[in-house]
Image (cartoon, rainbow, N blue to C red):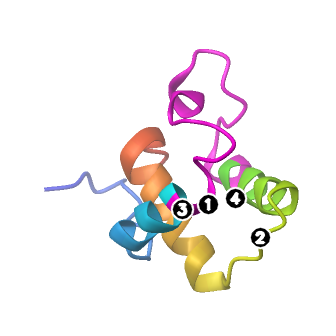
Amino acid sequence: MPSAYAVELPGDSADGKRLHDANCMGCHDTGIYTRKDRLVQSLDALKKRLGDCSHMANKEFSAIEAQNLIKYLNDQFYQFR
């Protein structure tokens, strides 16, 4: 059972993984999320970074797709609360 303080993000993590694998892995692998000097240190920073990466990849995600990506990345790698 999750902690009373845990934030359950909305979204579909499985779809986020599909979107991630199709759109993000062309530029980097998942090691970027777990390295010691990672740039993303908060949920807000994760949301901003997704916007920056979308711009660099010339890919526009819908609000639902972006939320699914954020949920996947947070569930899998960051666990921000």
Residue at the far front: name it: 26
Q: Amino acid at mark 1?
A: Asn
Name the mark on residue 47: 4
Q: Looking at the picture, does residue 36 appear above or below residue 24?
A: above
The residues tagged by marks 4 and 2 sit, at their Cα atoms, a distance apart of 15 Å
The part of the chain drawn in magenta is 22-45
Mark with earlier residue (4, 2): 4
Q: Amino acid at mark 2?
A: Lys
Task: Tell me, yes or no, whether the two marked residues, 2 and 1, touch with CB atoms within 8 Å.
Answer: yes
Which residue shows up at 66% across the image and 26% down it? 38
Task: Tell me, yes or no, whether the two marked residues, 2 and 3, touch with CB atoms within 8 Å.
Answer: no
Q: Residue 24: x and y, percent?
A: 62, 52
Q: Quadrant of the N terminus?
A: bottom left
Circle 3 sits on which residue? Answer: 22
Whether residue 46 is in magenta: the answer is: no
The residues tagged by marks 2 and 1 sit, at their Cα atoms, a distance apart of 8 Å
The residues tagged by marks 1 and 3 sit, at their Cα atoms, a distance apart of 4 Å
The residues tagged by marks 4 and 3 sit, at their Cα atoms, a distance apart of 19 Å
Q: Residue 9: x and y, percent?
A: 44, 68
* Callout 2 secondary element: loop
Which residue shows up at 56% across the image and 73% down it? 67
Which residue shows up at 75% across the image and 50% down it? 49
The residues tagged by marks 1 and 4 sit, at their Cα atoms, a distance apart of 16 Å
* Callout 4 secondary element: helix
Circle 2 sits on which residue? Answer: 59
Name the mark on residue 23: 1
Task: Tell me, yes or no, whether the two marked residues, 1 and 3, touch with CB atoms within 8 Å.
Answer: yes
Q: Residue 23: x and y, percent?
A: 61, 60
Mark with earlier residue (4, 3): 3
Q: Nearer the viewer, mark 4 or mark 3?
A: 3
* Callout 3 secondary element: helix
